[in-house]
Image: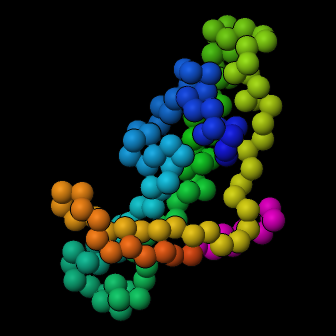
Amino acid sequence: MNPPLYGQYPLGGQYAFQHRDGTLLGTPPKYALPILSNYINNLEYEVNETMLRTTFPFRYNLGLTYKEDWIDIQSQIVNDYVDDIIVDGDPVLNFLDNNYLFMRYGFYKTTLTYRLPGGIDGTTATYRFKNPNDFRN
C-alpha cells in the first residue's frame, strides 16, 4: 500500500478519501482496529461472561481498510478520467497501472495503548494477529 497509495497521499495533491475521515483511522490507517459489536452487547447486557473473559475484543481490520481506500481513490481517478477532468499523460493516471495486493500471509503486530481521559497514556500491550489467507506469501 505504501508507496502507491499512502506514500503519495493525497494522490496528485487532490485525491483524498471520500468514504472515511482520514484523521479517525489515520493515513495510513494505523487505527483500523474496531471493537467487536457483539463484545459490546455482551458487556452491556452482562451475558456470555465466558466470551467476555476469553475473547480479544478487537478486530484487526487493516486489510479491509486498505482495500476500501484503494477502491475509493481508484474510483475517483477513473471517474475524473471518463469525465475528461484528467487528460492523457497526467501523472495521477499512473496509479491505475498499479495492482491492489492483499496483505501477505503471516503474523502482524499491533500495539494497543490504553489512554486515560486527558490523553494520558496508560498501559501498553503488543498483540500478534495472523492473516490466515495464504494465497499471497
Residue 81 placement (x, y as % from top left): 69, 15
Which is more toward the observer, 119 or 44? 119
Which is more toward the observer, 89 or 48? 89
Magenta span dominant secondary structure: loop
Q: Tell me which corner region of the image, top left, top right, bottom left or bottom right, holds residue 95.
A: top right
Up-down relation of residue 122 to residue 63 (above or below): below
Seen at 62% across and 47% down, the residue is 67
Horizontally, is 96 left or right of 71 in the view? right
Residue range corresponding to the magenta coloring: 129-137
Seen at 79% across and 12% down, the residue is 89
Up-down relation of residue 2 to residue 72 (above or below): below
Residue 48 counted in the magenta span: no
Horizontally, is 57 left or right of 41 in the view? right
Image quarter in which the C terminus is found: bottom right
Instruction: Give the colouring mode of the picture.
Output: rainbow
Residue 123 appears in the figure = yes
Residue 82 appears in the figure = no
Q: Residue furthest left?
A: 117
Residue 53 placement (x, y as % from top left): 35, 89
Residue 125 placement (x, y as % from top left): 43, 76
Horizontally, is 114 left or right of 71 in the view? left
Seen at 39% across and 41% down, the residue is 23
Up-down relation of residue 65 to residue 80 (above or below): below
